[in-house]
């Protein structure tokens, strides 16, 4: 397993680690160390040594630092001495490169491979809005990338002409660490599709979903009507997809629109005003209770698990608990 150290001047490293955790969940193999104003170079070096020693493989580490030539970089450079064939240092730390690092750690056990893989993602994460402010030479590749390449003609039938749905999941956070790691390994899809009218119009969340996808798996975010079209498009006959719904209402709309789903994995529904917590990760309100009743009437089965290793829970019992808490008879 690759160990990842984040090192910075001030609280930048702990802060960006918190951001990574919001996207992927807690990362056992990632530690943050900070050089504070009262510290000397030896202090942050000692913290990096302690972080490396805490990893399962302390000789297989990539260190992300905020600034090339700064104290964190210089001290990491001293630690790498004699380990140049295993360790790596990446300067200019930003969130896109760390998201890429976590994703690449799923498929690589080499710190140096992970370091090499994240460089372009870190550069691609630097953009300017309005885009007209970007230098012409930087803007040109973006325009070229927007042109579809090798589109499959309409009417083409691939495979048996029907998209394969390996998993359909309800999760308020859509794509995050537990989905990207555990469920992707269990399902082995070639596409992850977040199906949400709201998120499909949110450029920031769409970009985060696409960046959170594991290596080798394409991630998309589409509105519900588009997913209904995809379900009927024979060009997706060779596709194995994992569908992610933000709410049970979105899942119901997709099913009523023709998306063929037999089982819904109910993974996580965040708490908010008017909702009742029925277990550690699921909170339901009256609208949710009604929606699950409609889903059940459609013959949908429920697999209530946050991660593949969890034991399944009884959805009927959870609905009954929600009704009791909401005062619904």
Image: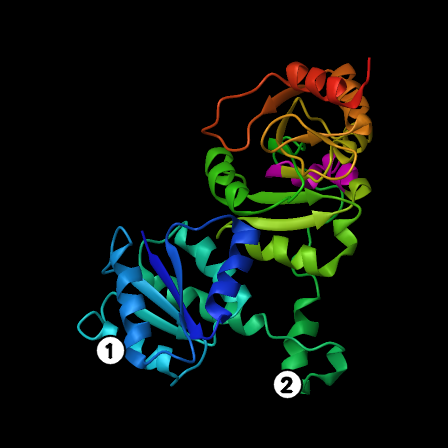
Mark 2: which secondary structure?
Answer: helix
User: Is residue 300 at least partly visible in the picture?
Assistant: no
Return the residue at label 1: 78
Q: Nearer the viewer, residue 137 or 65?
A: 65
Classify 10 Å Cα crowding around label 1: few (below 14), some (14-19), many (20 and above): few
Q: Position of residue 150 (x, y in %)?
A: 65, 57
Please state the extent of the stretch shown in magenta in the rendering. Answer: 227-242
User: Is residue 124 at least partly visible in the picture?
Assistant: yes
**Magenta stretch containing residue 232, yes or no?**
yes
Classify 10 Å Cα crowding around label 2: few (below 14), some (14-19), many (20 and above): few
Return the residue at label 2: 137
Could you tell which of marks 2 and 1 lies nearer the N-terminus? 1
Above or below residue 183? Residue 105 is: below
Above or below residue 115? Residue 254 is: above
Q: Quadrant of residue 210?
A: bottom right
Q: Nearer the viewer, residue 184 or 2?
A: 2
Tags 2 and 1 in contact by the CB under 8 Å rule? no
């Amino acid at each position: 397993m690759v160990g990842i150290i984040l090192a910075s001047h001030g609280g930048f490293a702990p802060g960006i680690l918190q951001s990574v955790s919001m996207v992927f969940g807690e990362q056992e193999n990632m530690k943050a160390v900070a050089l504070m104003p009262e510290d000397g170079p030896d202090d942050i070096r000692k913290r990096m040594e302690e972080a490396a020693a805490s990893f399962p493989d302390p000789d297989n580490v990539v260190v992300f630092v905020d600034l090339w030539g700064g104290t964190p970089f210089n001290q990491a450079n001293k630690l790498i001495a004699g380990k140049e064939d295993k360790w790596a240092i990446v300067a200019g730390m930003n969130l896109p490169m760390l998201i890429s690092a976590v994703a690449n750690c799923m498929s690589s056990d080499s710190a140096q491979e992970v370091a090499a893989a994240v460089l372009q993602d870190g550069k691609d994460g630097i953009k300017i809005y309005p885009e007209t402010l970007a230098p012409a030479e930087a803007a040109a590749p973006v325009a070229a990338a927007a042109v579809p390449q090798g589109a499959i003609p309409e009417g083409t039938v691939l495979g048996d002409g029907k998209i394969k749905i390996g998993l359909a999941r309800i999760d308020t956070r859509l794509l995050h660490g537990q989905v990207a790691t555990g469920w992707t390994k269990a399902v082995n899809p070639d596409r992850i599709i977040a199906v949400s009218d709201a998120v499909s119009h949110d450029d920031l969340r769409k970009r985060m979903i696409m960046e959170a996808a594991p290596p080798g798996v394409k991630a998309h975010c589409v509105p519900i009507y588009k997913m209904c079209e995809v379900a009927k498009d024979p060009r997706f006959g060779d596709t194995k997809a994992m569908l992610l719904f933000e709410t049970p209402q979105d899942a119901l709309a997709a099913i009523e629109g023709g998306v063929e789903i037999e089982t819904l994995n109910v993974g996580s529904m965040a708490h908010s005003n008017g909702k009742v917590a029925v277990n550690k990760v699921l909170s339901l309100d009256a609208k949710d209770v009604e929606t699950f009743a409609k889903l059940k009437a459609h013959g949908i089965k429920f697999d209530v698990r946050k991660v593949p290793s969890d034991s399944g829970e009884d959805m009927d019992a959870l609905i009954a608990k929600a009704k009791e808490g909401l005062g619904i008879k």
